[in-house]
């Protein structure tokens, strides 16, 4: 039996809806099985016995991992994998991969666009044109905010954070950052605490991952430290923000404006944020171009192929970097 024929016997579970390009490649290479959602009750006895890989957008918890005794790899579609219990997977000897790098530049582009849109109120200016106000009422009012003279703090200086910082350098803006630890050799000013960063800048961009360690890290205290000229942009994870505190800060002038691409309970956005006139809101489109999503799909599937042919992952997450293939 050839390698290609061997791969076609391997059952890859795809829960719910998934990227069409990835599904096409999985169908050509493996034996795809699907369930509507990642709930152990959805699994048949045959799935429990035969599934060796999962390709998904996330949402893989410990119970679902335990329900598949022959599971070897979870190929996560996306760089963020906080909804996959990677620590439990590692304990079970299950590899977890994600799709870094291929979406970095796209998300960084979106971040800059969202920042400018927020500061210059381009979302409101376009509405002014489209609804006829330009003809009926005259020019749109001058924007209160500008990028000129701003200082930027980046919460989460990983691949995307660095790409955002490179772009901001071209705008002539000073950059500082907060991470769990200082990055050696990086010239940007480092702050050991998020509050210290917020106090030092007037523009805070969050590219931080989700998870318990960052849950509601951007809270009332951080927003107060950012100040009344402050602009907050979130391109990372909605769970990192106390949305109730953010809505209050926008309403009472604690900060000036916010640009958000991610939310805690997507696709449900708090009404207070929808009603706020000083917000630019996007439906989680940071990497949502056909070009980038296709590259993400390819890397997701390439991880599965590499694992079952060369017995190694291409982009393992840190928690499972030492997981070895089963004999």
Image (cartoon, rainbow, N blue to C red):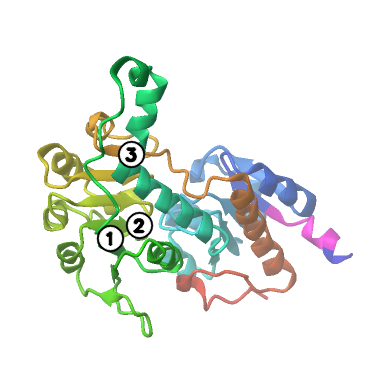
**Camera-nearest residue between 69 and 129:** 129
Q: Mark 2 = which residue?
A: 210
Q: Residues within 10 Å of mark 1 (few under 14, many from 20)?
A: some
Q: Residue at x 24, y 50 (%)?
A: 231
Residue 43 badge: none
Q: Dot 3 corresponds to which residue?
A: 280
Can residue 216 be seen here? The reply is yes
Label 3, residues with CA under 10 Å away: few <14, some 14-19, many ≥20: many
Give coordinates of residue 31: x percent, y percent.
74, 50
Measuring 66% from the left and 62% from the top, which residue is drawn there? 304
Residue 248 to residue 271: above or below: below
Q: CA distance from mark 2 to mark 3?
A: 21 Å
Q: Residue furthest right?
A: 1
Residue 6 is covered by the magenta coloring: yes
- Residue that carries the numbered disc 1 in the rendered image: 214
Residue at position x 26%, y 51% in the image: 232
Quadrant hosting residue 42: top right
């Amino acid at each position: 039996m050839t390698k290609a024929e061997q791969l076609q016997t391997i059952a890859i579970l795809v829960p719910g809806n998934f990227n069409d390009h990835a599904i096409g490649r999985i169908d050509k290479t493996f034996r795809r099985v699907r369930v509507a959602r990642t709930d152990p009750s959805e699994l048949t006895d045959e799935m429990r016995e035969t599934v060796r890989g999962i390709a998904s957008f996330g949402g893989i918890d410990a119970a679902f991992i335990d329900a598949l005794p022959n599971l070897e790899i979870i190929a996560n579609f996306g760089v963020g994998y906080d909804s996959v219990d990677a620590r439990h997977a590692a304990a079970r000897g299950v590899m977890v991969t994600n799709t870094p790098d291929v979406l970095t530049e796209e998300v960084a582009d979106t971040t800059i666009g969202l920042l400018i849109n927020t500061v210059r109120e381009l979302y409101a200016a376009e509405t002014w044109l489209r609804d006829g106000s330009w003809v009926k009422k005259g020019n749109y009012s001058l924007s209160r905010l500008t990028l000129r003279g701003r200082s930027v703090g980046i919460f989460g200086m990983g691949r995307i954070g660095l790409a955002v910082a490179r772009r901001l350098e071209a705008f002539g803006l000073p950059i500082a950052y907060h991470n769990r630890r200082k990055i050696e050799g990086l010239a940007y000013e480092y702050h050991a605490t998020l509050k210290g960063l917020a106090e030092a800048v007037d523009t805070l961009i969050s590219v931080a991952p989700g998870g318990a360690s960052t849950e509601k890290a951007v809270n009332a205290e951080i927003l107060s430290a950012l100040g009344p000229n402050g602009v907050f942009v979130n391109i990372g994870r909605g769970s990192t923000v106390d949305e109730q505190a953010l809505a209050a800060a926008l309403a009472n002038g604690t900060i000036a404006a916010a640009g958000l691409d991610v939310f805690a309970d997507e696709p449900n956005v708090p009404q207070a944020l929808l009603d706020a006139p000083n917000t630019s809101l996007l439906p989680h489109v940071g990497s949502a171009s056909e070009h980038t999503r296709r590259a993400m799909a390819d890397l997701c599937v390439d991880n599965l192929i590499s694992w079952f042919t060369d017995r190694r992952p291409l982009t393992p997450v840190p928690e499972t970097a030492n997981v070895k293939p089963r004999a």
